[in-house]
């Protein structure tokens, strides 16, 4: 019998039993509709590897990760280049998580994976709102005549829950038609106090890491200058703690695009904080 200790492949602080958990972390390694620089499918694996480098303790919430009772379920096996099949797999697994009275923290992967999660969530919850952190509008009806892409994920979600149930933060890139949609439905928000709009809603939080400025988050497929600082993003996350958050995901890390691994380390730290609001 070996007497040495081995590093786990799970995210730091994860509990050992699905039954005991309150939150399920689920990897969604898919980037089959990437429109710029691919590589987000490698994020879930690298996030787990790099998580050992962060502390379990959250200064923002005065908690340890091991107190949060989250289970790391590993990664889904998703077919490369087959978005409908990938979304179906995500939907089925999300549905199963909520049927077991748990919440999901999805780790992408590209942003399209959020659509599968929302579809699974809607089988168990009604009257939900989605709060999106992103550099991009993601409201394209089509991209190169294709509906299911990461650049149109929020448009597809809006068709399911209504534009009135979407809030968008950090947006600074998109087509004119998309910005006109945001203006029409007043989805763009600038101050955490605007979350009051959803005080009676069940909220799903989706964070595209390119919401952060490229000086902080260079390891992403479509970086956009002029983004939020980490502290600015955390002002929103801390405020979200006061609301009914029923699930979240963190997407669009492309770890191999940042050889310093700072982007991956930042993603790990953000995951720790988002776990605290679930």
Image (cartoon, rainbow, N blue to C red):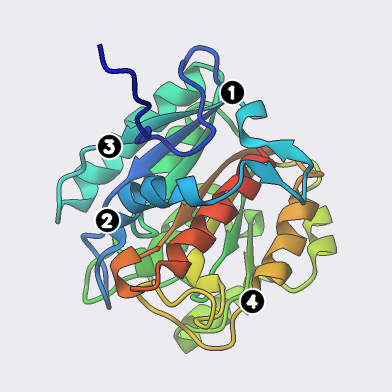
Q: What element carries label 2?
A: helix
Whether tag 4 and tag 3 are in contact, CB under 8 A, the answer is no
Q: Earlier in the sequence, mark 3 or mark 1?
A: 1
Residue extending furthest toward the front: 3
Side (left or right) of 9 relative to 213: left
Q: Earlier in the sequence, mark 4 or mark 2?
A: 2
Rate crowding at label 2 as few (under 14), some (14 to 19) or many (20 or more) other CA atoms within 10 Å. many
**Label 3, label 1: how far apart the Cα atoms are:** 19 Å
Q: Residue at left 51%, top 30%?
A: 14
Q: How many labels does the image show?
A: 4
Look at mark 4 in the image and give the residue it sits on.
228
Foreground pick, 101 / 256: 256
Which quadrant: the N terminus?
top left
Q: Is mark 1 on a helix, strand or loop?
A: loop
**Label 4, label 2: how far apart the Cα atoms are:** 24 Å
- Residue 239 place in picture, x, y as percent: 80, 54
Q: Residue at left 40%, top 34%?
A: 10
Q: Which of marks 4 and 3 is nearer the N terminus?
A: 3
Q: In which quarter of the image is residue 229?
A: bottom right
- Residue 91 place in picture, x, y as percent: 36, 35
Query: Is residue 169 in view from this perspective?
Result: yes
Tag on residue 76?
A: 3
Foreground pick, 115 / 272: 272
Look at mark 2 in the image and give the residue it sits on.
41
**Label 1, label 4: how far apart the Cα atoms are:** 30 Å
Tag on residue 246?
A: none
Query: Is residue 127 in view from this perspective?
Result: no
Whether tag 2 and tag 1 are in contact, CB under 8 A, the answer is no
- Residue 86 place in picture, x, y as percent: 24, 44
Q: Residue at left 56%, top 83%?
A: 172
Look at mark 1 in the image and give the residue it sits on.
22
């Amino acid at each position: 019998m070996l007497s040495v200790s081995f590093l786990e492949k799970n995210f730091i602080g994860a509990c050992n039993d699905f039954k005991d958990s309150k939150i399920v972390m689920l990897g969604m390694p898919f980037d089959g509709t990437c429109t710029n620089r691919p590589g987000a499918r490698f994020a879930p694996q690298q996030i787990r590897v790099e998580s050992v480098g962060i502390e379990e303790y959250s200064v923002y919430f005065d908690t340890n990760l091991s107190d949060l009772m989250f289970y790391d379920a590993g990664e889904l096996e998703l077919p490369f280049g087959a978005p409908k099949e990938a979304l179906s797999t995500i939907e089925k697994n999300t549905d199963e998580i909520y049927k077991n009275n748990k919440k999901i923290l999805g780790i992408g992967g590209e942003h399209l994976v959020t659509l599968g999660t929302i579809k699974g969530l809607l089988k168990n919850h009604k009257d939900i709102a989605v709060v999106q952190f992103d550099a991009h509008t993601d409201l394209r009806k089509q991209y190169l005549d294709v509906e299911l892409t990461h650049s149109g994920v929020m448009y597809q979600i809006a068709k399911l829950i209504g534009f009135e149930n979407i809030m968008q933060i950090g947006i600074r890139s998109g087509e004119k038609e998309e910005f006109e949609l945001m203006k029409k439905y007043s989805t763009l928000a600038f101050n955490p106090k605007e979350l009051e709009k959803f005080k009676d809603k069940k909220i799903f939080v989706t964070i595209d890491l390119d919401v952060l400025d490229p000086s902080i988050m260079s390891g992403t497929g479509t970086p956009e200058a002029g983004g939020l600082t980490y502290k600015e993003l955390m002002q929103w996350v801390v405020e979200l703690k006061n609301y009914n958050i029923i699930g979240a995901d963190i997407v669009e890390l492309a770890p191999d695009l940042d050889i310093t691994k700072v982007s991956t380390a930042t993603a790990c730290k953000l995951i720790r904080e988002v776990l605290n609001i679930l």
